[in-house]
Image (cartoon, rainbow, N blue to C red):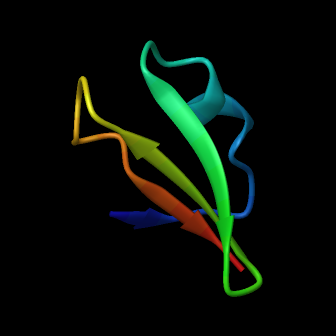
Amino acid sequence: MKVRNSLRSMKKKPGAQVVRRRGRTFVINKQNPRFKARQG
């Protein structure tokens, strides 16, 4: 999982979902789990 200061590039991947948990923003991707990211 990458920690990034911009999730914009991650949002465009097919299957990406932007989720907010515990004050942090996560991108989770069931189709391609390589593209997981956290912000904050």
Is residue 4 placed above or below 22 in the rendered structure?
A: above
Q: Position of residue 28 (x, y in %)?
A: 43, 47
Q: Is residue 5 left or right of residue 4?
A: right
Q: Is residue 9 left or right of residue 38?
A: right
Q: Position of residue 29 (x, y in %)?
A: 36, 36
Marks counted in the figure total: 0
Is residue 13 placed above or below 4 in the rendered structure?
A: above
Q: Nearer the viewer, residue 6 or 24?
A: 24
Q: Position of residue 30 (x, y in %)?
A: 27, 34
Q: Is residue 17 left or right of residue 2?
A: right
What's the residue at 44%, 12% (across, down)? 14
Q: Quadrant of residue 1?
A: bottom left
The residue sitting at the top extreme is: 14
Q: Quadrant of residue 21?
A: bottom right
The residue sitting at the bottom extreme is: 22
What's the residue at 55%, 36% (across, down)? 17
Q: Quadrant of residue 5?
A: bottom right
Is residue 29 placed above or below 31 in the rendered structure?
A: below
Is residue 27 placed above or below 15 in the rendered structure?
A: below
Q: Is residue 13 left or right of residue 34?
A: right
Q: Position of residue 18 (x, y in %)?
A: 64, 44
Quarter in which the C terminus is drawn: bottom right
What's the residue at 68%, 46% (across, down)? 7
What's the residue at 77%, 84% (across, down)? 23
